Image (cartoon, helix red, strand yellow):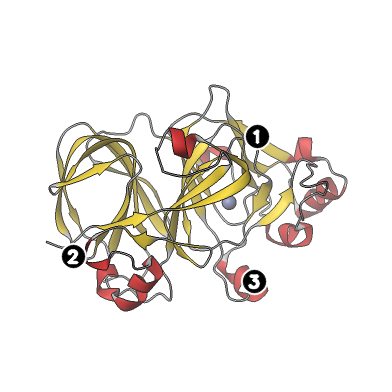
């Protein structure tokens, strides 16, 4: 049987971070400003090491280069996805990401960023920012330059278990109290549109207004096309949450045994609740791992919730 590839996450300290990664997920980290846990990542700003087994101690980026058969030999120059948990104690700045074409020209060949969120935890009255109210570019520019943020940004109520798709060009922000699992393209390019006029060490953080106005989509897509309530999804099966050019994301909500076949070039799993056993190996809340290419039959038993992902369905995997 092929080995599961368990990863040691990389953590980041952020001014808006909190302590739920320590308290809810029991990660052994110091500090009360932990904003992000990069669970499956092979990015220069965060490259996970393999936790155990034949490849213990290697970085995921090295494994991608040295052992391409583990990832179905797909023709991509880097591990294409990045999976992280974000714990926002404070509101994050309002941001937008470019697409591949814009990033390639303006960000030295970087990938653009398409991402999605699964809400792990939030307060009863939680909300976040997704999209804006401007009807065209002229109105967008007018509202941004006059600082009319209150009317421009679209804030919507959310609850635990909501899934939100964020295409490039979509204005978005997590507000304080929300914890999400983010599945995204392997990119770190973000344009900050608005930071609530906050000061860090006495100064406002840099904004990227020109680039933001270049890339923001007008008008924004309707909310119904971007948000999915997962509460009524079928249990004990891999439920597809979203499929696009870059990723397919699934929820696994399990309270008995299921069987499925790992048919993808690779299959990421992040356990968000509970514990269980996968092909004889114990898995628990906070574990992030990859089922490699050719892994074959998968049997999972236990009571757990996980978010899984693989590359997009229009990519050239065989
Ligand atoms: Zn983002």
Residue 202: x %, y % from top left: 83, 46
Q: Are marks 2 and 3 in contact (CB under 8 Å)?
A: no
Q: Position of residue 298 (x, y in %)?
A: 16, 51
Name the N-terminal-most of marks 2 and 1. Answer: 1
Which residue occupies 48% across, 56% down?
Answer: 184
Q: CA distance from mark 2 to mark 3?
A: 35 Å
Say which element carries label 3: loop
Q: Is residue 303 above or below residue 207?
A: above
Choose top left, top right, bottom left or bottom right for residue 241. Answer: top left
Q: Taking 134 as reference, is 181 left or right?
A: left
Is residue 42 toward the left or the right of residue 313 in the image?
right
The secondary element bearing badge 2 is classed as: loop
Return the mark for residue 294: 2
Count neighbours of disc 1 (C-alpha within 10 A) and say few if under 14, some if 14 to 19, many if 20 or more.
some
Could you say which disc has been placed on residue 155 in the image? Answer: 1
Q: Quadrant of the C terminus?
A: bottom left
| Residue situated furthest front in the rendering | 30
Residue at image position (13%, 49%) is 279
Q: Closest to the observer: 137 or 14? A: 14
Query: Is the CB atom of the residue marked by disc 3 within 8 angstroms of ligand 1's nearest atom?
Result: no
């Amino acid at each position: 049987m092929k080995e599961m590839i368990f990863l040691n996450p990389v953590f980041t300290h952020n001014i808006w971070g909190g302590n739920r990664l320590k308290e809810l997920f029991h990660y052994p980290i110091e500090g009360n400003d932990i904003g992000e846990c990069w669970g499956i990542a092979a990015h220069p700003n965060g490259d996970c090491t393999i936790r155990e087994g034949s490849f213990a101690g290697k970085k995921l980026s090295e494994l991608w280069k040295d052992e391409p058969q583990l990832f179905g030999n797909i023709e991509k120059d880097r591990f294409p996805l990045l999976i992280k948990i974000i714990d926002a104690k404070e509101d994050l700045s309002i941001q937008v990401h470019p697409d591949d074409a814009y990033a390639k020209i303006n960000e030295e060949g970087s990938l653009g960023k398409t991402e999605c969120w699964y809400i792990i935890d939030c307060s009863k009255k939680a909300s976040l920012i997704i999209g804006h109210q401007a009807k065209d570019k002229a109105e967008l520019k007018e509202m941004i330059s006059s600082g009319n943020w209150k009317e421009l940004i679209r804030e919507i109520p959310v609850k635990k278990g909501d899934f939100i798709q964020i295409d490039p060009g979509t204005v978005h922000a997590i507000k304080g109290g929300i914890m999400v699992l983010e599945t995204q393209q392997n990119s770190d390019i973000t344009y900050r549109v608005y930071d609530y006029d906050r000061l860090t060490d006495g100064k406002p953080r840099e904004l990227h207004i020109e680039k933001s106005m270049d890339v923001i989509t007008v008008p924004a897509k309707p909310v119904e096309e971007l948000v999915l309530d997962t509460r009524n999804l079928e249990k004990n099966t891999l439920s597809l949450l979203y499929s696009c050019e870059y990723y397919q994301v699934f929820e696994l909500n399990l309270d008995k045994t299921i069987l499925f076949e790992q048919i993808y070039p690779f299959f990421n799993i992040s356990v968000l609740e509970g514990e269980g056993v996968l092909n004889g190996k114990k898995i628990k809340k906070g574990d992030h791992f990859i089922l490699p290419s050719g892994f074959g039959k998968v049997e999972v038993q236990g009571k757990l919730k996980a978010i899984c992902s693989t590359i997009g369905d229009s990519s050239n995997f065989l």
